[in-house]
Image (spheres, grey):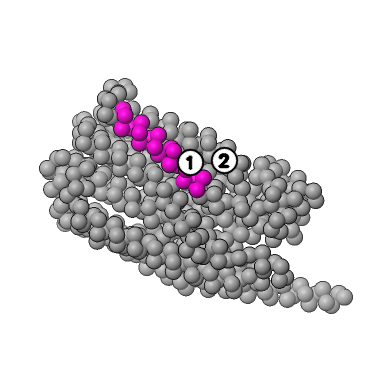
């Protein structure tokens, strides 16, 4: 038993070095996509015009909406794989990786199909696009729809590698993808290279090619890389496609030679284990589907409200959206640390010998990642306030668009940065807790009790862009309060309860063995 405890140095999951080791590469990883969006937005608005900027914003937001709606069976894969690694449940790990990839392909094709079927209805009936913006958006919409399967596969592959703690590899992969996309976009815009008569279409082609290359590379990497906790002969290929071989004494002894395994007693029923893992994916996925629907509905409703205000408001809305998401992905580096490290600590609630030490380090991890996120949010608020004119000038030269931004919307963006940073880090901690039913329920309440009433005021009374983003800001206040309650009270209490249940179960087994003797 003592050897079992010593094999786990939990300070490796809560130290500043461990957090930075995950967070810094993850910041690079998470910031790549929104930074690319910021660059594309800036160059389209500055060198092409508001018609291209409006079309880009509308299509990108809707495609992003579809991507996040259909990733409900993929979302959280890093927490699930990290938990399996924390338990040394290698066969379960293989099943979770396989399910994640299969669901990514299936949901990607479904998302693509839905976007194409609803193309005219959404662009003309819902978004009310017209004129030059509609002309620009029509072809670009198709390219953005084709991108959805590749985005979901890329999310799945990145999550798997993050669960393996190969965050530097993931960061490098996504950085290369982003550099190709950014560099290619700037090139086609600046040199006026047009695909089907449009520079915006050329940007869409560049994005599609860059993600195709990323997905191919990611598929190779998940089989080349492996969790540091795994033994020398660990093979993801065997765990995924030939799990019956993983129970052979020769393979399992080599696989577990360095660190051991916690699931040796669970290897008796392969089919039951596979079914339970699939059921786990589907059950949690359905809860996260509701969460994703609500989250993306807030962005979609905000977009619709902005389009009804006019083209200048749509352009300003696109700028705020990019900056809002940029910070979220930067702070998500600390959220990734919470997921990757927290899921490993959370997985140890199943072992009474390690649970007390794991809980102590989990509490330490929570405090440290939240503090880091808050400092980042405050810093971003200061930069946005001090450099407001310079930042806005990077995106547009249109005086009416600038006036809309300065009429309360920018001030709101500045004020909510510390709040948003806490919300984004809490999101990562919630994934580590895997309390998906609670997440679903409190998102439902927040949407109907907080977000929709403020949107009602915006539509009936305010008629301003800041009113749209006020609804988003107050919804984030609700998210922060709910997440704080979940993490600091519910999650830690469930951790103790699981430890107590396992401890009683272990004592019962010991008593049975003694009676038999």
Can you give x and y, in whole percent of width and height, for residue 109 in the image? 49, 36
Asked if labels 2 and 1 touch by Cβ distance under 8 angstroms, the answer is yes
Can you give x and y, in whole percent of width and height, for residue 288 in the image? 47, 54
Residue 154 located left or right of residue 266? left
In the image, which residues are magenta? Answer: 168-188
Magenta-span inclusion, residue 183: yes
Look at the picture and state if 337 lies above or below 508: above
Magenta-highlighted stretch: main secondary structure?
helix
Comparing 205 with 12, the one in front is 12
Can you give x and y, in whole percent of width and height, for residue 337 in the image? 48, 58
**Considering the image in quadrants, where does the N terminus appear?**
bottom right
Comparing 233 with 95, the one in front is 233
Residue marked by disc 2 = 221
SS label for mark 1: helix
SS label for mark 2: helix
Which class describes the residues within 10 Å of circle 1: few (<14), some (14-19), or many (20+)? some
**Considering the image in quadrants, where does the C terminus appear?**
bottom right
Can you give x and y, in whole percent of width and height, for residue 229 in the image? 63, 55
Residue marked by disc 1 = 173
CA separation in Å, label 1 and label 2: 9 Å
Look at the picture and state if 234 lies above or below 192: below
Q: What's the residue at 48%, 41% (across, down)?
A: 173
Q: Is residue 356 visible?
A: yes
């Amino acid at each position: 038993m003592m050897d079992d405890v010593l094999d786990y140095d939990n300070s490796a999951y809560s130290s500043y070095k461990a957090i930075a080791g995950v967070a810094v590469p993850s910041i690079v990883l998470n910031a790549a996509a929104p930074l690319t969006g910021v660059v594309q937005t800036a160059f389209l608005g500055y060198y092409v015009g508001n018609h291209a900027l409006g079309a880009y914003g509308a299509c990108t937001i809707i495609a992003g909406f579809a991507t996040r709606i259909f990733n409900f069976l993929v979302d959280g894969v890093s927490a699930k794989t990290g938990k399996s690694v924390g338990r040394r449940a290698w066969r379960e790990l293989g099943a979770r990786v396989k399910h994640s990839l299969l669901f990514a392909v299936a949901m990607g094709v479904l998302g693509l199909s839905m976007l194409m079927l609803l193309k005219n209805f959404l662009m003309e009936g819902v978004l009310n696009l017209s004129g030059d913006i509609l002309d620009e958006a029509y072809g670009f919409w198709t390219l953005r729809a084709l991108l959805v399967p590749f985005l979901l596969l890329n999310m799945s592959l990145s999550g798997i590698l993050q669960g393996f703690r190969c965050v530097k590899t993931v960061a490098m992969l996504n950085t290369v993808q982003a550099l190709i996309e950014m560099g290619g976009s700037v090139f086609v815009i600046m040199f006026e290279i047009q695909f089907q008569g449009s520079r915006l279409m050329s940007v869409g082609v560049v994005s599609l090619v860059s993600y195709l290359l990323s997905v191919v590379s990611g598929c190779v990497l998940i089989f080349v890389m492996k969790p540091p906790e795994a033994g020398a002969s660990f093979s993801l290929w065997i765990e995924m496609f030939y799990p019956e071989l993983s129970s052979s004494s020769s393979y399992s002894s080599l696989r577990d030679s360095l660190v051991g395994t916690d699931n040796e007693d669970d290897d008796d029923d392969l089919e039951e284990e596979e079914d339970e893992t699939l059921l786990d994916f589907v059950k949690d996925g359905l809860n996260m589907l509701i969460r994703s629907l609500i989250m993306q509905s807030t962005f979609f409703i905000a977009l619709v409200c902005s389009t009804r205000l006019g083209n200048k408001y749509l352009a300003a809305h696109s700028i705020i959206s990019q900056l809002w998401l940029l910070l979220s992905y930067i702070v998500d580096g600390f959220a990734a640390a919470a997921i990757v490290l927290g899921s490993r600590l959370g997985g140890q609630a199943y072992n009474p010998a390690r649970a007390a030490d794991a809980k102590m380090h989990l509490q330490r991890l929570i405090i440290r990642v939240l503090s880091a996120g808050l400092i980042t949010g405050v810093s971003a608020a200061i930069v946005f306030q001090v450099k407001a004119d310079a930042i806005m000038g990077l995106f547009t030269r249109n005086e009416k668009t600038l006036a809309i931004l300065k009429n309360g919307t920018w001030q709101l963006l500045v004020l909510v940065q510390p709040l948003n940073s806490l919300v984004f880090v809490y999101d990562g901690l919630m994934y580590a807790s895997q309390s998906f039913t609670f997440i679903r329920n409190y998102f439902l309440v927040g949407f109907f009790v907080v977000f929709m009433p403020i949107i009602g005021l915006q539509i009936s009374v305010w008629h301003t862009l800041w009113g749209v983003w006020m609804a988003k800001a107050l919804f984030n206040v609700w998210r922060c309060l709910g997440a704080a309650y979940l993490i600091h009270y519910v999650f830690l209490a469930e951790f103790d309860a699981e430890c107590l249940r396992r401890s009683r179960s272990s004592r019962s087994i010991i008593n049975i063995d003694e009676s038999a003797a």
